[in-house]
Image: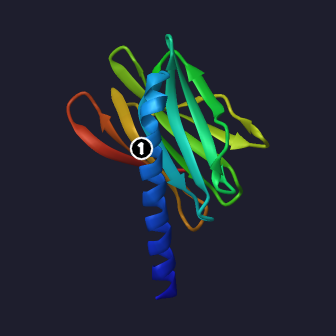
């Protein structure tokens, strides 16, 4: 029962956090922020926020952590001329933060990832799905520290849901 109560408290706290972020989003949208933000909570109940900001022809992906009751300044995760959308986030038990997003170029959309390791973000890496289009990724880390990625994909004929384990 205690585990269930703790989970409910974390869920309610996360809901209030999301409401606070939504209330603040109007100002951000006026400053060129793409209105797409994702809050992730890791296995230690650490909250992270990832979002995309459009600056001219650039689409910058940022991450902020919620520490000691305040959001930290955003860290640049990736900068691209691709339309970067639908970011997802997960932190593994080793403290690495993984961000996966969809990058649209012309008529195709591919998945990319970057990882925070040794106090630096890796360069974005394209995830080869061999599909015409891959979007809306969702990333989790299981109890064995295994990354699981699910996404919507189009193979040229059908839309389907795909997954991969790293």
Q: Position of residue 119 (x, y in %)?
A: 78, 41
Crowd class of label 1 (few under 14; some 14 to 19; many from 20; radius 10 Å)? few
Image height of 4 relative to 97, above or below: below
Query: At 42% from the left edge and 59% from the top edge, which residue is drawn?
Result: 15
For this view, does 12 lie left or right of residue 154?
right
Tell me the residue at 69%/57% (across/down).
Answer: 68
What x and y, as percent, mark residue 19?
42, 51
Q: Is residue 105 above or below residue 76?
A: above
Is residue 148 among the parts visible in the rendering?
no
Q: Residue furthest left?
A: 157
**At 51% across and 35% down in the image, what residue appears?**
51
Q: Position of residue 140 (x, y in %)?
A: 50, 55
Farthest residue in the right direction? 118
Can residue 108 be seen by looking at this rendering? yes
Say which quarter of the image contains residue 114: top right
In front of the other: 14 or 133: 14
Q: Residue furthest bottom?
A: 1
Callout 1 secondary element: helix
Judging depth in this view, the residue of 12 and 108 nearest the camera is 12
Colour style of the rendered protein structure: rainbow
Q: Which residue is mark 1?
A: 22
Q: Position of residue 63 (x, y in %)?
A: 60, 39
State left or right for residue 25 relative to residue 60: left
Residue depicted at x 50% and y 22%: 31
């Amino acid at each position: 029962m205690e585990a269930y109560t703790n989970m409910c408290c974390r869920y309610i706290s996360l809901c209030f956090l999301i409401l606070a972020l939504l209330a603040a989003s109007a100002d951000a949208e006026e400053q060129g922020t793409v209105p797409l933000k994702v809050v992730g909570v890791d296995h230690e109940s650490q909250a992270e926020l990832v979002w995309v900001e459009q600056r001219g022809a650039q689409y910058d992906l940022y991450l902020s952590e919620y520490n000691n009751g305040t959001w930290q300044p955003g860290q640049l995760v990736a900068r691209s001329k691709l339309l970067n959308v639908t970011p997802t986030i997960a932190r593994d038990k080793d403290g690495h933060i993984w961000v996966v997003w969809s990058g649209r170029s012309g008529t195709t959309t591919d998945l990319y990832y970057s990882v925070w390791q040794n106090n630096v973000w890796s360069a974005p890496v394209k995830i080869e799905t061999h599909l015409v289009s891959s979007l809306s990724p969702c990333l989790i880390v299981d109890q064995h520290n295994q990354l699981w990625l699910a996404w919507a994909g189009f193979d040229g004929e059908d839309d389907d849901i795909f997954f991969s384990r790293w």
